[in-house]
Image: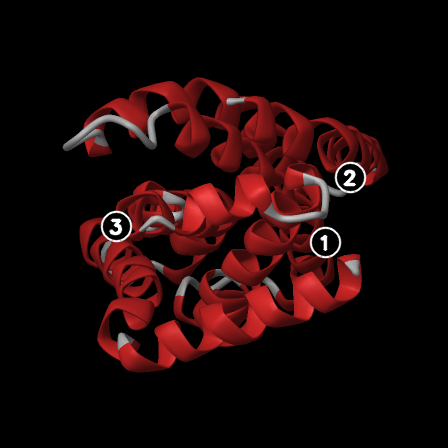
């Protein structure tokens, strides 16, 4: 029953996403614009760009995730689907987890696939690309799970975009620090394992707790 419900929910989300293909591209385009602005502001010095590339890439991905966060559950609340979730014979936390996974796969995963190209735009040293990819693979699902709790808390409010950002950013700061910090440590020749392990621990904790918190909200 749980996997049947998950399959139905994913299929519905993908159909809706296909009908709003333009909206689905907005986070990726926004991240690209942020990186272009970074590159224009810092000039053509590739050494300087490489020094800040890890942080700039992380900030771009974080901000692009905030752009789509307000719509995570709002459409379901407006068309009555959320009430059907509450009446479904499966745990609400499971449906929340499925929605967050679909949201991550459709908004963040394309950015991760394009990350080698974006890293080249920002002149990131090739030796730091594996650390960046691992930190993104661990950190972006953690951001999505934390954001789901905030989106669930504000789903009943109208025009809550700014409020969502204000509530989510303090939760995002540790993820940004450990994610960008691990890339910076690798750039300086230091061991980046500590930051990556902390991201992994946060992801495991969020997988267990965030869907329950969002369902309660």
Q: Which residue is mark 3?
A: 42
User: Can residue 175 be seen in the rendering of this structure?
Assistant: yes
Q: Which mark is residue 196?
A: 2
Task: Give residue 107's quadrant in the image.
Answer: bottom left
Query: Residue 67, relative to residue 158: is it above or below?
Result: below
Give the CA distance from mark 2 to mark 3.
28 Å
**Horizontal and vertical percent position of residue 193:** 84, 39
Q: Which element is circle 2 on?
A: helix
The earlier-in-sequence mark between 2 and 1 is 1
Is 93 left, or right, of 20 in this rendering? right
User: Can residue 144 be seen in the rendering of this structure?
Assistant: no
The earlier-in-sequence mark between 2 and 3 is 3
Is 35 left, or right, of 125 in this rendering? left
Give the CA distance from mark 1 to mark 3.
23 Å
Which mark is in front, 2 or 3? 2
Residue sitting nearer the eye, 73 or 199: 73
Instruction: Specify the quadrant that holds the N terminus.
Output: bottom right
**Horizontal and vertical percent position of residue 42:** 25, 50
**Horizontal and vertical percent position of residue 122:** 41, 62
The earlier-in-sequence mark between 1 and 3 is 3
Give the CA distance from mark 2 to mark 1.
8 Å
For the residue carrying disc 2, how many other residues have a C-alpha within 10 Å: few (<14), some (14-19), or many (20+)? many
Query: Residue 77, relative to residue 114: is it above or below?
Result: above
């Amino acid at each position: 029953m749980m996997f049947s419900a998950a399959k139905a929910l994913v299929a519905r989300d993908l159909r809706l996403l296909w009908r709003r293909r333009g909206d689905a591209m907005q986070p990726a385009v926004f991240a690209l614009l942020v990186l272009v602005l970074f590159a224009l502001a810092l000039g053509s010095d590739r050494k300087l760009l490489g020094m800040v590339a890890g942080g700039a890439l992380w900030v771009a991905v974080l901000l692009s995730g905030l752009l789509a966060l307000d719509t995570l559950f709002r459409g379901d609340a407006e068309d009555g689907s959320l009430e059907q979730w509450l009446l479904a014979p499966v745990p609400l936390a499971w449906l929340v987890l499925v929605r967050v996974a679909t949201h991550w796969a459709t908004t963040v995963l394309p950015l991760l696939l394009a990350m080698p190209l974006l890293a080249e735009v920002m002149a990131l040293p090739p030796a730091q690309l594996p650390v960046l990819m691992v930190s993104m693979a661990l950190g972006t699902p953690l951001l999505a799970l934390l954001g789901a709790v905030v989106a669930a808390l504000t789903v009943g409010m109208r025009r809550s975009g700014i409020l969502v950002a204000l509530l989510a950013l303090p939760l995002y700061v540790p993820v940004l620090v450990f994610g960008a910090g691990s890339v910076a440590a690798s750039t300086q020749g230091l061991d980046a394992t500590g930051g990556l392990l902390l991201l992994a621990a946060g992801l495991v904790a969020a997988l267990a707790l965030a869907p329950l918190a969002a369902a309660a909200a």
